[in-house]
Image: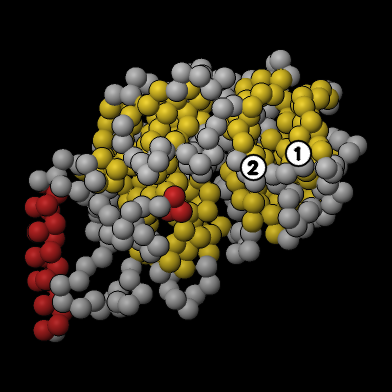
Amino acid sequence: MNKTILRFVGTCILMTLFIGTLSSCSLRAKDVAIPEDFYDVYIKAISPDGSKILLLGAKDSWQMYDYYLADPDTLDFTVMNLPENSEDISFSQDGKSILFRVDREISVLRTDDNVITTIYDKALIDGASPCFSPDGGTVYFLGEDSQLYRHSLAAQDNILMTDFKVAQFFIPGDGSNILLQNKAEPMSELLVMNSDSGSLNKIADLESEKYSFVTSPDGSKILMYSVPRKELFFIDIAKGTLAPLPFDSERCSPFPFQFAPGGDRILIGSSFGEDPIKLYSMNFDGTDRVLVYDAPIFDYRVSRPDQKIVCVGLIDERTEVYTLRTDGSFDNRIPIREMYGIISESNMNFSASGERFYYSEGSHSAIYMMRSGSTMIQKVAKYFSPFVDKNDPPPGYTYGTDHCEQ
């Protein structure tokens, strides 16, 4: 009885202090009840618009991990039928379907009724690369013969798209074209395929190695990065051309290259000497490199809905999320309190549009969400310490409170 009273009194005091802190904050933490506590929780996938997230979490240290579909607006959580060993997970554009692979099987899960449909059972274990078309009605993947297949979710059929082995593929823009790299040694070919007719045009010969791709908003231009050689290329789909970009690999950061708002310039992270990484923009030919904002950054995305740049970086030695206008001026700044050191790329997650930003404060933490252009910080999932009994915490200990920075 005494223990219960002390716990109640202690909770009241903590809540009073917490509410007082909130009233003095320039930021507002959304006053909502978080239904889920996790012993451990990770973000595995985010829908392109950020309206749904897929979490992998365990409620206690002795429990198996489950997948949870979370709606960050309503804070509804649904346990999904995804196997724990699922890989290559992605959402459709509308968030209504989840694509995943388990060993050699590629399947689609409908989020409304939790029903799984296997669409192919002979996929490559490494390199199948299943992905949705931009409209969500088609799935592309590499089959057991390393050739490209297309699966129509409406017709439930698999159509062979190539008569040669494919090393990797990429679908830019609206999905009307598919960029292909054939599998050949020592040189491969970079090809563009019309997704309707299947016609092919050769763009260039390439070294047979791994590349990463970033598309412009309309899909007409692509940035291609050579991972092993750290070389950057610019592809014009309409012209069918590929050109190397002036690029100092020792000065550039590993986070994604992006097209600037409007798609008329390139954003790139660079550092000079011992200086930290900062964000620059430049023309498609690498000329006219301009510093966007004079502050170190960890990561960034372009928010397509409002055509702004969403950054995470250091300002006055404090980690902040901020949005920039195209002229480099501030649109909004949101400080992030650091609990376990600097927030790293491993626990920062942007939606594809850049409209929403999810983060956690260290390897074990609650998950928070922020919207581009808003000062609202919302907690999506709570985390409790594995060293503390959540049903009987020691005096003065609390967990699961909303986050606010003074």
- Of residue 402 and residue 286, the one placed in the foreground of this image is 286
Name the residue tied to disc 2: 229
- Of residue 390 and residue 302, the one placed in the foreground of this image is 302
Decide: is 166 above or below 268. below
Residue 35 in view here: no
Q: Going by the picture, which residue comes out furthest to the front?
A: 273
Q: Is 276 displayed left or right of 257 in the figure?
A: left
Which quadrant is the N terminus positioned in?
Answer: bottom left
Q: Who's the residue at 36% across and 41% down the image? A: 275
Decide: is 127 above or below 356. below
Q: Who's the residue at 30% across and 74% down the image? A: 390
Q: Which mark is residue 207?
A: 1
Report the Cα–Cα distance between label 2 and label 1: 10 Å
Q: Is 99 displayed left or right of 208 in the figure?
A: left
Mark 2 vs 1: CB contact within 8 A: yes
Q: In the rendered structure, which disc, 2 or 1, sits on the residue that comes first in sequence?
A: 1
Q: Who's the residue at 73% across and 31% down the image? A: 179
Q: Is 163 displayed left or right of 244 in the figure?
A: right
Q: Who's the residue at 71% across and 15% down the image? A: 239
Q: Which mark is residue 226?
A: none
Decide: is 33 above or below 129. below
